[in-house]
Image (cartoon, helix red, strand yellow):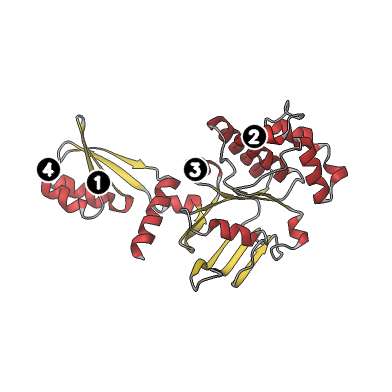
Amino acid sequence: MPAPAIEFRGVAKTFHHRFSEIEVAALANVSFEASQGEVCAFLGPNGAGKTTSINLLMGFLFPDSGEIRVLGYRPGDPRAKRRIGFVPENFAFYRYLTAPELLRMHLALAGCRENGASRIPELLARLKLNGYESLKIGKYSRGMVQRLGIAQALLADPELLVLDEPTSGLDPAGRKEVLALLAGLKAAAKTVFLSSHILPEVEQICDRVVILDRGRLVRAGRLDEMLAGVGRVEIEVDQLPEEIEAAWAARGVAAERAAAGIRLTAPDALKRELAESLWSAGCDVIRVNPVKSTLQDLFLKLVEDYEGAQ
């Protein structure tokens, strides 16, 4: 069995303000892994520690404790770095260069000037930047710069892509194209470590999810298994006595009234008990439908429960 592409083991990182005694714990005992050949969504509210984690992964920062491995090496090891493509959340390119000039420079920095030159026209076309080869980057729109950032990350045909908000600044059509590109990378057995706030789009392509909040791990695992554990069901009835509604509301069952009837939404584990309670109360159960949970539903619930427990 191949080693994980990314491993965090008990990682902690605290930032110290230089001119005060204030300390900010960015990460505390964080452990997770991402397997080779899968898309791992790295999620959390603002300030959760995602960017700090990515900076540690890339070797830009060092942990206070714990261990990190990327492609089997310590972060920053040249043997790993040459196999990684990286798109940070905020970046800037030399404004006076054209896209081909910039990509040729990055090829030289990666040490593959000769072997990779033929990929430049292909990548510019793939990212919808062909036709702008003579335009200086300073004239690019925000979305065009974002596409160029993804192009440079793909330039050396890396095994691992680390992407921090890769669809930032893109219009809906551009986001759709980037998602298709990531799906193609997944099909080619590349590993993608992806941070994003656009959860419905992430759900379309990710295999694994890692959720942080306030520097701590909230949940990590395969998406299909996580969603299977939070299934819900809709039960439609013709009537709903107030005492029954109040009793089930206390257990997390929501009721919605419409002209066609009353719809109850409940955790799947309560389905049989709720239906029997309704029948016993004289309600006519019209239909029972499973409700597929979404990544966004899961994320919001986990974060809300975590913050409520603090």
Residue nearest the observer in this picture, 299 or 236: 299
Residue kind at label 1, given as amino acid type: Ala
Dot 1 or dot 2, earlier in sequence: 2
Separation of disc 2 and disc 3 at Cα?
Answer: 19 Å
Badge 2 marks a residue whose secondary structure is: helix
Residue nearest the observer in this picture, 167 or 19: 19
Circle number at residue 282: 4
**Residue indicated by mark 3:** 198
**Residue indicated by mark 2:** 144
Residue drawn where x is 47% and y is 41% of the image: 200
Residue 154, picture quadrant: top right
Separation of disc 1 and disc 3 at Cα?
Answer: 26 Å
**Residue indicated by mark 1:** 254
* Front disc: 4 or 1: 1
Badge 1 marks a residue whose secondary structure is: strand
Crowding near the residue tagged with mark 3, few <14, some 14–19, many ≥20 C-alpha atoms within 10 Å: some
The reply to whether dot 1 and dot 2 touch (C-beta < 8 Å) is no
Dot 2 or dot 3, earlier in sequence: 2
Residue drawn where x is 59% and y is 72% of the image: 64
Dot 4 or dot 1, earlier in sequence: 1
Crowding near the residue tagged with mark 2, few <14, some 14–19, many ≥20 C-alpha atoms within 10 Å: some
Residue kind at label 4, given as amino acid type: Gly
